[in-house]
Amino acid sequence: MPLSNATIAEINALNYDNEIFYLFWAFALIALGTIGHSLSIYVFTRPILRSNPCACYFLSATIIGLFVTYVNTPLRLLQYIYNYDVFKYSTASCKILTWILLCARYRLYF
């Protein structure tokens, strides 16, 4: 006996709502990430901060964060919304893309 009496139409409506939410969330993430990272790059490239090692580290983390915003978010958007998976074409492309994306994301935290 099922725990829920949800119909197929209700399930499809929830899936559609989830896709629309993720679509708008991804575009908002790209827009806000661009604004935030651009402002951080503007601040950390000031001449007075160039000699500070912490500012250099934050500048590199900002540039990597911009890469993640422009590469990882659209790839996930293609996967979840448009069902286009760039990782499935070959084992080599899957491993290379996964390695690049994971290295970029983990580089933010170290």
Image (tube, rainbow, N blue to C red):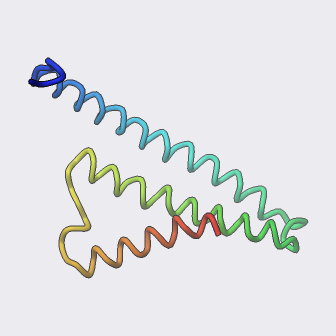
Q: Residue at x 27, y 77 (%)?
A: 93
Q: Residue at x 49, y 47 (%)?
A: 30
Image quadrant where one finds the C terminus: bottom right
Is residue 49 placed above or below 69 in the rendered structure?
A: below
As drawn, is 45 to the left or to the right of 71?
right
**Residue 59, x across and y down, in percent:** 71, 65
Residue placed furthest toward the right: 48
**Residue 102, x across and y down, in percent:** 46, 69
**Residue 92, x across and y down, in percent:** 26, 81
As drawn, is 16 to the left or to the right of 28?
left
The quarter holding residue 50 reads bottom right
**Residue 57, x across and y down, in percent:** 74, 69
As drawn, is 5 to the left or to the right of 106?
left
The quarter holding residue 51 reads bottom right
* Residue toward you, 50 or 55: 55
The quarter holding residue 85 reads bottom left
Residue placed furthest toward the front: 1
Q: Residue at x 83, y 62 (%)?
A: 46
* Residue toward you, 11 or 70: 11
Image quadrant where one finds the N terminus: top left
Q: Residue at x 81, y 68 (%)?
A: 54
